[in-house]
Image: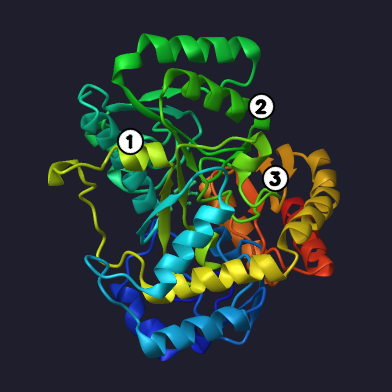
Amino acid sequence: MAAEGAGRAADAPGWFEAGLPHIWLPYTQMAVEPPPLAVSSTDGVHIDLADGRQLLDGTASWWTACHGYNHPHMVAAMTEQARRMPHVMFGGLVHEGALRLARRLAAVTPGDLDRVFFSDSGSVAVEVALKMALQYWVNAGETGRTRFVCFEGGYHGDTLGAMAVSDSEQGFAATFRGALAAQITTALPRTRAAAAEFESLLDSRRGEIAAIIVEPLVQGAGGMLFHDADTVASVAAAARSRGIPLIADEIFTGFGRTGQMFACQAAQLVPDIMCLSKALTGGAVGLGATIARPHIFDAFLGDDLACAFMHGPTYMANPVACAAANASLDLFESEPRLDQAARMEALLRQGLEPLRALEGVADVRVLGAIGVVELDDLPLPLLYRLRRGFIERGLWVRPFGRIVYLTPALVMEDAEIDRLCAGIGEVLRGI
Ligand SMILES: Cc1ncc(COP(=O)(O)O)c(C=O)c1O
């Protein structure tokens, strides 16, 4: 098989040809899609391919690598940790990196979000949040609160529980609809009238609702849809006044992506539970964190083990992942990441806004270090052509659905951001 976009089978390394027949790739129709590219290394904002080509990365690997790849401070922290203790179980044992990270996350997240439960991915961080909310009510003697309020356009992960609170009308959740727990899916209340309707919904289903789950400001993988701070603030106010826990999924938005450290800060809200992952480790290694306010944590205290939170992923709080996350927080403290996000917002706006005039472009939107060009339609053959066009220009931009997006490393240089925006323009004009 030839590598994507190039017909360079002769250049493919032995491991590529030998291993490809045995790999099952994500989100890929393997019967027809071009094979993946063979990567040999990463560096800064670049992905180096095994055939010698280099791609400028517009995605930061699914918006994780906020400091760019292989940042020396992160590599040193992980290397030192791997030498000393790559892993140890977290049942009955703790280690410095995890406790230090928990303390720092409690300090950096809004308000009194204070108790950190570690896991190993974003989806699991969401599962943990959902289970926390369910058991919060069971421990309080309310066993009928088994449903979640979630939003159209939302995406919270690929495990069954996370899919159930994602928008089942779009994306991949629809396939599994019959197997997913029924939740209460509604539109984000973007107007005052909609907010009143939303409150009526909460009142009419009151005894059933365990929690509300929302992606603040940006619904990411569900289509990179934006809403304003007032919208999420009204959701939070409606939840708070009814004693319904609010779960903020900041797996996409956290760590500077929207211009603030956390999107909740733009709405000045403190959720009852917050989910973090992705850029938590600066994109180096998988780690999830579900952070709860004291009243949630306290509901699990008592002399009965059944009241405790009975969940424990084997690799939770992996020491190398915690070392990466601590090093990433060091970089947020010592380098001007939020200023860089603000600068990127201006550059993305300048570079992408003119594309609004192109035929077939439905919308252009920018927030922080997120740039989106939404097309009227993007049938699969065209999607593949677009992807190929980017690779031919030395860019790693990977459209999905009807969306061409940029979520670069926050450290990217101005000229590189301009190159990405110009590349999107060229590729769109070419189709
Ligand atoms: C908002 C949000 N929640 C949850 C997830 C799931 O994270 P993971 O892919 O690490 O399971 C994602 C992934 O894109 C996400 O964007």
Which residue is more in the foreground, 47 or 209?
A: 209
Whichever of callouts 3 and 1 sits on the residue coming sooner in the sequence is: 1
Quadrant of residue 218 in the image? top right
What residue is shown with label 3? 373
What residue is shown with label 1? 133
Whichever of callouts 2 and 1 sits on the residue coming sooner in the sequence is: 1
The mark tally for this picture is 3
Residue located at (54% from left, 44% from top): 401
- State the CA–CA distance, disc 2 to disc 1: 24 Å
Residue located at (30% from left, 67% from top): 315
Left or right of 147, for residue 427: right
Residue located at (79% from left, 69% from top): 413
The N terminus: image quadrant: bottom left
Please, what is the three-letter code of the amino acid marked with disc 2?
Asp
Q: Residue furthest front?
A: 303
Please, what is the three-letter code of the amino acid marked with disc 3?
Val
Marking on residue 390: none
Residue located at (60% from left, 81% from top): 73
Quadrant of residue 76 in the image? bottom right
Tag 3 secondary structure? strand
